[in-house]
């Protein structure tokens, strides 16, 4: 099946944060004011920005990041969508020990919260710093959460043929949902329009990063200015651990058991011969 | 034929061994299910992590208690394990023929710990410490340490798991199943081995202990 994707056009975003609210409402992630005793709560705070809550959390899978930069003596106020990027080559899917994170048939990274073991490997492996978890530091009981592209079981909009909640609510058309190929073409066209209008640094982010992201960004300036990693990579530790050490572990374990089995057969036969 | 017996392991050592190895097996199994994708479902909702942490607490606390109660015994054990002589090199050369074919002709006499046991001790001490350091960081600095550090901690923890896990199989096999290790099981359960076994397997050590006895 053709991959689906979301196209986010930062130049059309007004940071109304309707997407944040729609995401919370549809996915039943009520905002709450965490008491100081809740170690996992990210409390709202007044820090001189409209950006709120200050960070993603197990209850906040999507937020708009506000960036203020100075360019040519003027202040520019930039908005970026911050949520799971749904990579094709997804580090989280690689490290998840039991397939709780997996690729949906439409390409994005789906998640089965019921089977999550709370190991937190995905949190450390993600190049975009997206997954968040609740965690009891003493017992180790934990549960991860992130954007599921509205495919959470029982709340699956995609299976109904609907668009994700964030896209549905976007009033300016900054968020679009559709076939990925079509959205890539549309994004490129929009970049050309922007460049023609004088935004020479305009670019489409996510076309080829990590095998192709399923959230594409139309930006009027370099990704780094928007706080996006310039060339996101699967970390060396992920590769050394998953692709080197784990296969070696299987080989070492297997050879040990085989070696001991052979030793047992030979040594027992010899012991019997001696006894006779 | 005499049924003379010698004490190989004192009771506190045996108790230490079984509590510590029980904790290690618990840690091994609850860790293994994250290694085998097909068994990962057993870890759902983190309850195996709770067991892993209880096992880890026992794994750390028991040797510390023993160290506090009897530091001399720990020092003596470490000295035994880390002192190598030319007889240990001889053991390494003779080991394949001995363990497969039962040929003891070129096997040099061994002390209280033979070379294989010394190597196992080395693995237990070195990787035990690595397990604890990386484990403590993963358990208590999960929210504060940089992600790259945590990922390398998992890596080192897994390397330790692979080496000590494979050697655990060897250890259990030699203690329980190998046809020549007739008295190993009774040594670590009841504490005693027959004089014949001691003479054959730990010649140097038997000479030391029996000398004292004969004089007395």
Image (cartoon, coloured by chain):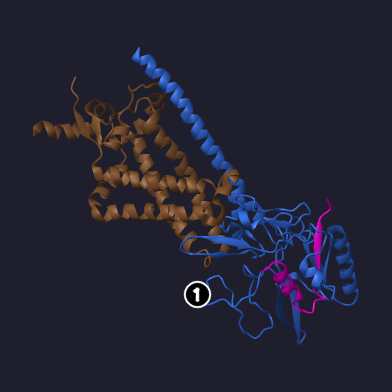
Q: Residue at coordinates 32% horizontally, 32% vertically from top-left?
A: B184
Residue B190 falls left or right of residue A195: left
**Residue A264 % position (x, y):** 44, 25
Residue at screen point 64% across, 53% down: A100
Q: Is residue A90 magenta?
A: no
Q: Nearer the viewer, residue B100 or B204?
A: B100
Q: Using the image, name the chain to which the residue with label 1 belongs.
A: A
Look at the picture and state if A83 lies above or below B175.
below
Quarter of the image for the C terminus of chain B: give it.
top left
Q: Secondary structure at mark 1?
A: loop
Instruction: Give left or right: position of A127 versus A223.
Output: left
Q: Is residue A27 magenta?
A: yes
Determine the residue located farthest toward the top in the rendered image: A276
**Image x and y of residue A7, in percent:** 81, 66
| Quadrant in which residue A142 is drawn | bottom right
Residue A185 position within the rendered picture, expressed as x and y whole percent measured from the top left: 88, 62
Which residue is at the front of the view, B96 or A266? A266
Residue at left offset 54%, top offset 46%: B33
Instruction: Give the residue at mark 1.
Output: A37
In terms of depth relative to the viewer, which is nearer, B40 or B147? B40
Return the x and y of residue B58 as percentages of the image width and height: 37, 53
Indicate the chain coloured brown by its letter: B
Q: Is residue A108 above or below residue A20?
A: above
Disc 1 residue crowd, few under 14, some 14–19, many 20+, Cα 10 Å: few
Name the foreground residue: A229 vs A184.
A184
Q: In the image, which residues are magenta?
A: A1-28
* Residue name at image x 38 percent, y 40 percent: B119
Supply the letter of whichever chain is blue. A
């Amino acid at each position: 099946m053709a991959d689906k994707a979301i196209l986010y056009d930062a130049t059309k975003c007004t940071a109304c944060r309707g997407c944040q609210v729609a995401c919370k409402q549809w996915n039943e992630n009520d905002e709450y004011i965490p008491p100081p005793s809740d170690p996992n709560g990210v409390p709202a705070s007044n820090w001189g920005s409209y950006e709120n809550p200050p960070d993603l959390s197990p209850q906040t899978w999507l937020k708009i990041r506000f960036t203020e930069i100075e360019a040519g003596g003027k202040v520019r106020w930039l908005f970026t969508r911050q949520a799971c990027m749904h990579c094709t080559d997804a580090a989280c899917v690689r490290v998840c020990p039991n397939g709780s994170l997996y690729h949906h048939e439409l390409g994005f990274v789906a998640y089965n919260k019921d089977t999550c073991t709370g190991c937190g490997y995905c949190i450390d492996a993600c190049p975009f710093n997206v997954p968040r978890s609740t965690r009891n530091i003493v017992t180790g009981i934990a549960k991860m959460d992130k954007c599921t592209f509205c495919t959470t079981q029982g709340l699956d909009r995609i299976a109904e043929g609907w668009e994700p909640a964030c896209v549905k609510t976007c009033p300016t058309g900054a968020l679009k949902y559709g076939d990925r190929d079509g959205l890539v073409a549309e994004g490129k066209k929009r970049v050309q329009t922007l460049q023609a209008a004088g935004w020479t640094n305009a670019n489409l982010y996510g076309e080829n990063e990590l095998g192709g992201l399923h959230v594409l960004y139309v930006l009027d300036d370099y990704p780094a200015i928007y706080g996006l990693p310039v060339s996101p990579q699967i970390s060396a530790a992920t590769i050394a651990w998953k692709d080197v050490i784990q296969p070696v572990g299987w080989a070492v374990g297997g050879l040990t058991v085989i070696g001991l089995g052979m030793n047992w057969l030979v040594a027992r036969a010899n012991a019997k011969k001696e006894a006779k | 034929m005499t049924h003379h017996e010698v004490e190989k392991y004192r009771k506190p050592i045996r108790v230490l061994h079984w509590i510590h190895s029980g904790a290690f097996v618990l840690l091994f199994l609850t860790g293994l299910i994250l290694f085998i994708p097909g068994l990962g479902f057993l870890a759902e909702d983190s309850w195996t992590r709770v067991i892993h942490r209880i096992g880890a607490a026992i794994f750390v606390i028991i040797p510390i208690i023993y160290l506090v109660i009897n530091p001399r015994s720990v020092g003596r054990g470490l000295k035994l394990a880390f002192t190598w002589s030319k007889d240990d090199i001889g053991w390494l050369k003779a080991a394949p023929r001995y363990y497969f074919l039962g040929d003891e002709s070129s096997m040099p006499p061994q002390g209280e710990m033979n070379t294989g046991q010394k190597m196992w001790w080395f693995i237990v001490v070195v990787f035990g410490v690595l397990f604890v350091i990386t484990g403590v960081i993963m358990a208590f600095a999960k929210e504060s340490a940089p992600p790259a550090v945590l990922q390398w901690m998992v890596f080192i923890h897994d390397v330790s798991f692979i080496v000590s896990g494979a050697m655990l199989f060897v250890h259990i096999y030699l203690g329980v199943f190998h046809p020549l290790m007739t008295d190993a099981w009774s040594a670590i359960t009841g504490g005693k081995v027959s004089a014949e076994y001691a003479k054959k397997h730990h010649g140097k050590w038997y000479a030391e202990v029996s000398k004292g006895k004969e004089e007395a």
